[in-house]
Image (spheres, grey):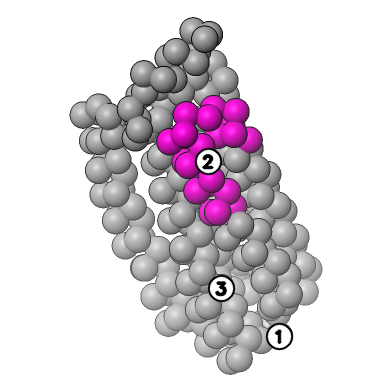
Amino acid sequence: MSHAEAHLDKLPPEPEKATLEGRNKVLGFWLFLGGETVLFGTLFATFLALRGSVLDGPTGSELFDLKLVAAATFILLTSSLTSVFAVQAMHHKNVKNLMIWLGVTVLLGFGFLGLEIYEFYHYVDVGHGFTTSAFSSSFYALVGFHGAHVALGVLWIGLLIIQLKVKGLNTITAPKIYVASLYWHFIDVVWVFIFTIVYLMGKVG
């Protein structure tokens, strides 16, 4: 048995909660997500209040391509599943599979961001800029803020993969992986609300 394998055998079943520091990180991150929920709630409320204020600009029903948005939604929800597989691999102390699933999650995150950038580029091209109307400002503020969260998550998980490569799986890196998966699930849940409230409701008027 190699030194690395012997080290993994000594890890507890849930290494992310094995230490007081790890448990505090998880608890602290839940509190952080509570604050994020309030922030997104404010952006949703602003969008709902302003979504009818289009002035001379295009409306949501004229703009939104549900096929494109559905593809982005499928990619992001799939990435949530791959992050679950990553945490399961961590609990099985399979570092190789853990890094693979985290890598797949990052790639899917890039795929989502690519579609969102293309979508924004298309909207601006047809006259739906940030200052076109109150509707466009609230749209870009909400959807763009979510996209920034996805970009941050991609960067965060990418750095965790590097840290796993350097330091391996232990009671220090495990809580970081766990809270990163919580964060990724959170932005997926927020996107489900964006898909429903912004795109579906916008398409039907």
Please say whether residue 34 is visible from this viewpoint: yes
Q: Which residue is mark 2?
A: 86
Amino acid type assigned to the residue bearing label 2 in the image: Ala
- Callout 1: helix, strand or loop? helix
On whether residue 90 falls in the magenta region, the answer is yes
Q: Earlier in the sequence, mark 3 or mark 1?
A: 1
Label placed on residue 29: none
Hey, which quadrant is residue 48 in on the image?
Answer: bottom left
In magenta, the rendered stretch is: 79-100
Q: Which residue is mark 3?
A: 195
Camera-near label (2 vs 3) is 2
Amino acid type assigned to the residue bearing label 1 in the image: Glu
Magenta: main secondary structure? helix
How crowded is the residue under tag 3: few (<14 C-alpha within 10 Å), some, or many (20+)?
some
* Horizontal and vertical percent position of residue 38: 31, 62
How crowded is the residue under tag 1: few (<14 C-alpha within 10 Å), some, or many (20+)?
few
Q: Which residue is mark 1?
A: 62
* Horizontal and vertical percent position of residue 7: 42, 14
Which is nearer the eye, 138 or 26?
Answer: 26
For the residues labelled 3 and 1, the Cα–Cα distance comes to 16 Å
For the residues labelled 2 and 3, the Cα–Cα distance comes to 26 Å
